[in-house]
Amino acid sequence: MASSSFFRRWVRPEVYPLLVPMVTVVSLVGMQLVRNITTNPEVRVTKEKRAAGVLENFEEGERYSQHSVRKYVRNRRPEVMPSINKYFSDPK
């Protein structure tokens, strides 16, 4: 009985535009959490890795910080919409 009132109140067509950004943000946060737990050299989940103490693993830290997305945007101009910027800023 409680679930039907929940769906009747919250799952309406007016709520769908709110669900899209919320699902996107929750997915990005989940992806970042999984990335940090699995690949971050400073996060140690297992007891054996925690017992190792402070490690001097600069190569692993460099691999973590210089990921593929950062390498892709490294030499690009910081523009969101380059074609629109070029249209309004460059005179014909």
Image (spheres, grey):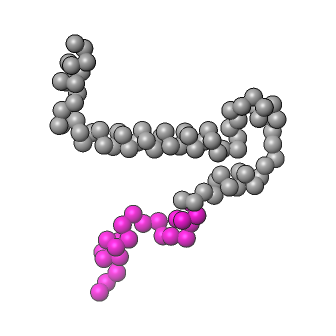
- Judge whether 21 appears above or below 7 on screen: below
Left or right: 55, with 29 as reference point = right
- Residue lying at the far bottom in this picture: please name it: 92
Residue at 68% from the left image edge and 55% from the top image edge: 63
What span is in magenta? 70-92
Q: Residue at x 64, y 45 (%)?
A: 39
Instruction: Check the image and report above or below for 26 versus 60.
Output: above
Q: Quadrant of residue 70?
A: bottom right
Give the quadrant of the C terminus.
bottom left
Find residue 65 and report its horizontal and vertical position in percent: 64, 53
Q: In this rendering, would 12 be left or right of 37?
A: left
Question: Measured along the vertical axis of the image, is residue 91 above or below residue 15?
Answer: below
Q: Residue at x 34, y 81 (%)?
A: 90
Residue 37 percent coordinates (x, y): 62, 38
Q: Viewer-proximal residue, 61 or 31?
A: 31
Image coords of residue 80 (percent x, y): 39, 63
So how many labels did they put on this image?
0
Q: Position of residue 54 (x, y in %)?
A: 81, 39
Magenta-span inclusion, residue 73: yes
Query: Measuring 24% from the left and 14% from the top, which residue is drawn there?
Result: 2
